[in-house]
Image (cartoon, grey):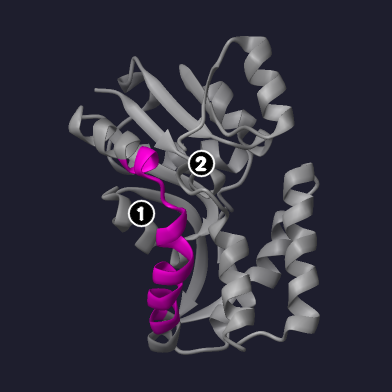
Amino acid sequence: MELVLFDLDNTLLAGDSDYEWAQFLIEQGVLERASYEQRNQNFFDQYKAGTLDIYEFLDFQLAPLAQHPRAQLDAWHTLFMATKILPIITAAARALVTNSLQNGSLCAIVTATNSFVTAPIAREFGVNHLVATEPEEDGGRYTGKVSGLPCFREGKITRVEQWLSAQGRRWSDFPVSRFYSDSHNDLPLMERVTHPIAVRPDPTLEQTARARGWEVIALD
């Protein structure tokens, strides 16, 4: 059995679900455009530059979850899926995931984006395992804080290892492991697997992938 891991944003998706969720809330009038739109763009630019403070970003990104009941959040997410996410899922991305599942691989989506945003997306792809940043909950409501270690950079390795351990598995159980990603922020996990695959890579990742002879694909 192979272990196949997929980054989500700008990898399986032709866009960024974290960024689009904030933009969606702005468009719905839930968040004030003047104060949120520029901050959302600034955090996105910091992510691309490799300078993002993940805890500062999560304070920003998770705060709206604490301000509304879960039923309202779920209703917004249904509309978000239809208007923002389904249009950026390509046939090639669906085929890649489907083929991996049909080949009997153990598959997981591994993403820094929080699980409230990403769990329905994982289900859309038919992937049962999601390793994501977890928003803290108290009494059925989100607190606006993060629970445990964010699934970001080196944290992705730790979180994947915790997920494997919970299933009674280890890295050594898999002679072949693959990780698909677009971002240089994912280099730690890409270096951990036997087969890293760069998908629409950013310039830094593309340079690294070409230099090391890693596979580069588009999923367009």
Instruction: Identify which amino acid the numbered label 1 is placed on.
Output: Ala
Span of residues in magenta:
74-94
Q: Residue at x 44, y 59 (%)?
A: 87
Instruction: Identify which amino acid the numbered label 2 is placed on.
Output: Thr
Of tags 2 and 1, which is closer to the observer? 2
Location of the N terminus by quadrant is top left
Label 2 to label 1, Cα distance in Å?
Answer: 13 Å
Which x, y percent locates residue 205?
67, 28
Q: Name which quarter of the figure residue 36 lies in.
A: bottom right
Residue 18 belongs to the span the image colors magenta:
no
Which x, y percent locates residue 188?
62, 30
Side of 148 relative to 32 (left or right): left
Structural crowding at the residue carrying mark 2, measured as other residues with C-alpha within 10 Å and reported as few (<14), some (14–19) or many (≥20): many
Which x, y percent locates residue 201?
62, 32
* Mark 2 / mark 1, whichever is N-terminal: 2
Q: Secondary structure at mark 2?
A: helix
The label number, if any, that marks residue 11 in the structure image: 2
Closest to the observer: 147 or 177?
Answer: 177
Reply above or below: 125 against 210: below
Reply above or below: 138 against 47: below
User: Which residue position is annotated with label 1?
Assistant: 122
Which x, y percent locates residue 58?
66, 64
Closest to the observer: 56 or 9?
Answer: 9
Side of 98 relative to 46 (left or right): left
Structural crowding at the residue carrying mark 1, measured as other residues with C-alpha within 10 Å and reported as few (<14), some (14–19) or many (≥20): some
